């Protein structure tokens, strides 16, 4: 992610002038949006794709399962090929403009062309510079391209990812493992383990998908964590995240966080935005903020959390270390507002004896929905802007 196009004409996702969509295409877009929500949030957007036969009937549905896996379009095409389906003359309905670059997977625009698909309908433009331009490539190959179908829903699905791309920062997941009374440790500092084995396993699976995990220097000095992705036997498994430590104090040479590989980055700052800038420059596109309380609160106060995962244990302590410090909120009207996130496994899951709560910042209240009332809390956790594409880069008008 090197950045986003700046708006010079129409806003991102504005429908093509004169574009029209059939009932089958509209139904397919709803199915594609539902499929997209099955994927994990993170470095890549949630994307779904449905292939329609020449008679308008749905043939296959694909979605993106996370960084490094097949994109939604390629997933759908692969399913069709495995089933022996001939896609020549078929249509594809996809929630985001097909990509046009070779990353860890090939360009989807080329895969669509090679499959013989002759009609593509997508919801919104891809603002990611390296990936953008798929619509132009498709049109140049003679594929009919239309955009703007269910644009608002597609934009909302990935609005925080769009925010991160526009700001040139990593997508930020914040993780809290706490008791019913919001404690992350007892008075004596013990915290292993507040969470159930199932919650721990879920967290380690997430560690295997992220690019980096961040804690404060106080957490390193007190808890001496390893911050690696481990299996149920406690052994390191799969891809390991960069381990980042934020704060002015140094990291002891014998700290467990160094591990065998020494893949550790010390961020000598207390400014969350400055930390994100350094991580972005280091290639990090998905960051999980793990703790402690001051670090969690600093990112929340700065409005830099895109996804919140809380593991809630049925335990009471009554005293101990609170999950959060002061957020600078003195009145209920200024409270941060969050909403349940049904994507990526759902808003609420049972993990053993724990509840896993999945949330994202609430959308800013629109003036129309609350006449004369401002919502500082909403704007503090979610931006009002989204990245825009230059009009010359869109597939405006269809063909």
Image (cartoon, grey):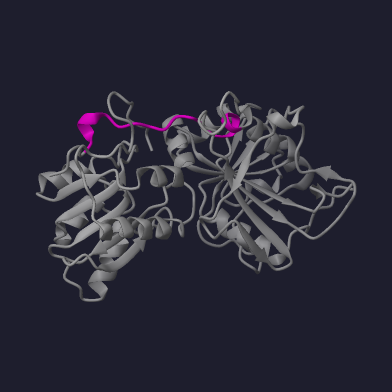
Q: Does residue 384 show up magenta in the picture?
A: yes
Does 232 appear above or below 254? Answer: below
Instruction: Please state the horizontal and vertical placement of residue 148, each as a whole percent of the image.
Output: 29, 43
Question: In the image, what residue occupies the spot 48% across and 30% down?
Answer: 384
Q: Looking at the image, can residue 58 be seen?
A: yes
Which residue is more in the foreground, 308 or 119? 119
Does 396 appear above or below 55? Answer: above
Which residue is more in the foreground, 126 or 147? 147
Q: Where is the N terminus found, in terms of image quarters?
A: top left
Q: Residue furthest bottom?
A: 83
Q: Where is the C terminus found, in terms of image quarters?
A: top left
Instruction: Please state the horizontal and vertical placement of residue 104, each as a whole percent of the image.
Output: 34, 52
Left or right of 91, for residue 206: right
Question: In the image, what residue occupies the spot 61% across and 61% down?
Answer: 202
Which image quadrant for residue 369?
A: top right
Which image quadrant for residue 85?
A: bottom left
Question: In the image, what residue occupies the spot 70% across and 30% down?
Answer: 333
Q: Which residues are magenta?
A: 378-394
Left or right of 152, for residue 170: right
Which image quadrant for residue 32?
A: bottom left
Instruction: Please state the horizontal and vertical placement of residue 223, each as a whole percent of the image.
Output: 77, 47
Which residue is more in the foreground, 120 or 307? 120
- Counting every numbered tag in the picture gives 0
Left or right of 123, for residue 153: right
Q: Does residue 248 show up magenta in the picture?
A: no
Q: Looking at the image, can residue 284 be seen?
A: no
Instruction: Please state the horizontal and vertical placement of residue 250, each as a whole percent of the image.
Output: 70, 32
């Amino acid at each position: 992610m090197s950045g986003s196009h700046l708006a010079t004409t129409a806003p991102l996702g504005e429908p093509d002038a004169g574009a029209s969509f059939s009932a089958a295409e509209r139904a397919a877009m709803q199915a594609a949006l539902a499929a997209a929500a099955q994927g994990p949030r993170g470095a890549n957007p949630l994307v779904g794709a449905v292939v329609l036969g020449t008679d308008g009937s749905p043939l296959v549905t694909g979605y993106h399962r996370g960084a490094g896996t097949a994109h939604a379009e390629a997933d759908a095409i692969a399913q069709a090929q495995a089933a022996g389906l001939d896609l020549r003359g078929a249509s594809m309905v996809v929630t985001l403009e097909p990509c046009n670059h070779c990353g860890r997977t090939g360009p989807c625009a080329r895969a669509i062309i090679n499959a013989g698909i002759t009609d593509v309908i997508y919801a919104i433009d891809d603002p990611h510079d390296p990936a953008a331009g798929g619509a132009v490539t498709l049109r140049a190959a003679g594929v009919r391209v239309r955009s703007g179908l269910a644009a608002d829903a597609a934009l909302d699905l990935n609005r925080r990812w769009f925010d991160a791309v526009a700001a040139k920062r990593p997508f930020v997941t914040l993780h809290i493992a706490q008791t019913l009374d919001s404690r992350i440790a007892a008075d004596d500092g013990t915290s292993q383990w507040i969470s159930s084995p199932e919650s721990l396993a879920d967290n380690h699976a997430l560690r295997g998908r992220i690019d980096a995990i961040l804690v404060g220097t106080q957490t390193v000095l007190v808890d001496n964590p390893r911050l690696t992705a481990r299996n149920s036997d406690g052994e390191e498994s799969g891809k390991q995240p960069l381990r980042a430590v934020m704060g002015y104090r140094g990291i002891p040479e014998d700290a467990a966080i160094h591990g065998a590989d020494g893949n550790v980055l010390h961020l000598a700052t207390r400014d969350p935005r400055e930390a994100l800038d350094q991580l972005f420059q280091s290639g990090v596109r998905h960051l999980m903020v793990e703790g402690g309380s001051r670090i969690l609160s600093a990112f929340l106060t700065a409005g830099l959390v895109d996804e919140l995962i809380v593991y809630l244990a049925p335990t009471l302590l009554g005293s101990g270390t609170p999950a959060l410090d002061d957020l600078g909120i003195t009145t209920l009207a200024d409270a941060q507002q969050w909403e349940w996130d049904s994507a990526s496994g759902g808003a609420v899951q049972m993990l053993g004896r724990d509840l896993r709560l999945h949330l994202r910042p609430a959308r800013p209240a629109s003036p129309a929905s609350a006449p004369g009332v401002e919502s500082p809390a909403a704007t503090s956790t979610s931006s009002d802007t989204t990245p825009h594409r230059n009009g010359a880069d869109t597939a405006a008008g269809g063909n």
